[in-house]
Image (cartoon, grey):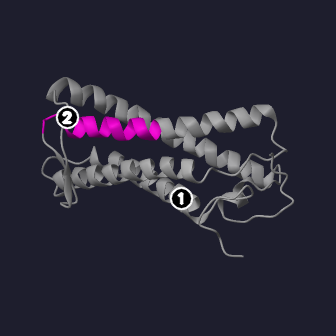
Amino acid sequence: MLMQFSNTPQRYGVISAGLHWLTAIVVYGMFALGLWMVTLSYYDGWYHKAPEIHKSIGVMLMMGLVIRLVWRVISPPPATLTSYSPLIRLGAALGHFALYALLLAIVISGYLISTADGKPISVFGWFDIPATLADAGAQADIAGTLHLWLAWSVVILSLLHGLMALKHHFIDKDVTLKRMLGQASSDYGVQK
C-alpha cells in the first residue's frame, strides 16, 4: 500500500513522516556540527566555514519547523491509540509540545547568537536574514549559553522519545512506531 500525503486517523502521511525524520537527521547533524565547531582553532580552515554552514542550516531548520506546525494544523496527526493510558497520552502530548518548544527556542537562540554583532545571516548565499536585535557582548553570551543547554535538552528528550517509540514497538507491541513509518490497519484501536 502506498503512503498517502496527508495524515489519516490510522497513520502519518508521507509529508508528516518525511518532515519528522528529516528534522531528526538535521537536529543530530547540527548537534554534532556544533560540538565539532567549538573545538576548532582560529587558524583551522573550517573555523569560519563551519559556523556559516551551521547558521544556514539553522535558518532552514526554522523554516522546516514553521512548515511542520502549519502542516500539523492542515493535516492533524492520527488519534491516539485506545491502548494508551491517560498518563501515556499526557506524557506523549507534553513530550511533543516540549520537543517543538525546544526546537523553536534553539533556532531563536541561534539567531540571537548569529546576529548579536548586527550583521545579517547569509543563508548559503541565497538570501539574508536581517539582524533585529544587536548587543554583541551580552546577547551572544546569554544566547550562546541557552543554545548549548537547549541543544543538549532536545537531544536528551528526543532520545527518550525514540526509546518510548521502541518500547511501544517491542514491549507493548502496538503500532505507534509503525504509524510513523506509514503502515496502517483498521484494527489499530484508534481513539475517536
Give the class, few, some or many, for how many residues have Cα within 10 Å of label 1's Cα (few <14, many ≥20): few
Q: Label for residue 115?
A: none
Residue 80 or residue 27, whichever sits in front: 80
Q: Amino acid at mark 1?
A: Trp
> Helix or strand or loop: what does disc 2 sit on?
loop
Please name the residue that numbered disc 2 is placed on: 132
Disc 1 from disc 2: Cα separation? 31 Å
Residue 47: image x %, image y %?
A: 18, 51
Residue range in magenta is 102-118
Please name the residue that numbered disc 1 is placed on: 21
Question: Magenta stretch mostly in which secondary structure?
Answer: helix
Which residue appears at 85% of the width and 52% of the height?
Answer: 189
Q: Amino acid at mark 2?
A: Thr
Give the class, few, some or many, for how many residues have Cα within 10 Å of label 2's Cα (few <14, many ≥20): few
In the rendered image, residue 69 lying in the magenta stretch gets the answer: no
Which residue appears at 58% of the width and 45% of the height?
Answer: 159
Residue 154 or residue 179, whichever sits in front: 179
Residue 36: image x %, image y %?
A: 32, 50
- 63 relative to 145, above or below: below
